[in-house]
Image (cartoon, rainbow, N blue to C red):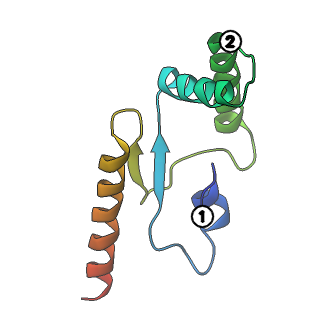
């Protein structure tokens, strides 16, 4: 399951999740990726406007009173701005295997 507050608000109930990943990307990289996605859909928008929009969304999500976006204590941080897709998958796979092994002890 994926979502901006899935682990902290949706899955943090009973039964609890087995593993949570928190994906983090710097604003410059995230904006550029979103801008490229929009361009591929023939959307005319400036990179500056995309960056403003993402910055505003992140601020709203982290500062809202209820259900604010935050990392849960046991989440594994995945930095998508410094890892390639294959490195990200490898890191996640390693964490999942480690979790499975610890549950089977």
Q: Relative to 51, is 81 above or below?
A: below
Q: Relative to 36, is 100 above or below?
A: below
Q: Which residue is mark 1?
A: 1
Q: Residue 79: x and y, percent?
A: 39, 40
Q: Residue 88: x and y, percent?
A: 35, 49
Crowd class of label 1 (few under 14; some 14 to 19; many from 20; radius 10 Å):
few
Q: In screen coordinates, is 62 left or right of 103?
A: right
Crowd class of label 2 (few under 14; some 14 to 19; many from 20; radius 10 Å):
few
Res 64 quadrant in image: top right
Foreground pick, 61 / 46: 46
Res 40 quadrant in image: top right
Q: In screen coordinates, is 99 left or right of 53?
A: left
* Alpha carbon separation for disc pair 2 and 1: 31 Å
Res 96 quadrant in image: bottom left
Q: Residue 104: x and y, percent?
A: 29, 88
Residue in view at x 67 percent, y 64 percent: 10
Q: Which residue is mark 2?
A: 46
Residue 30, disc:
none
Name the element at disc 2: loop
Residue in view at x 67 percent, y 20 percent: 50
Foreground pick, 75 / 86: 86
Q: Relative to 103, is 49 above or below?
A: above
Name the element at disc 1: loop
């Amino acid at each position: 399951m994926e979502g901006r507050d899935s682990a902290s608000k949706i899955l943090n109930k009973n039964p609890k999740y087995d593993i949570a990943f928190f994906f983090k990307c710097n604003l410059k990289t995230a904006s550029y990726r979103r801008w490229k996605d929009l361009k591929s859909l023939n959307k005319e928008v400036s990179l500056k406007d995309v960056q403003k929009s993402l910055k505003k969304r992140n601020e709203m999500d982290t500062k809202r009173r209820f259900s604010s976006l935050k990392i849960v204590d046991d989440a594994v941080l995945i930095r998508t701005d410094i890892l390639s897709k294959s490195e990200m998958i490898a890191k996640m796979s390693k964490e999942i295997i480690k979790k499975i092994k610890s549950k089977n002890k």
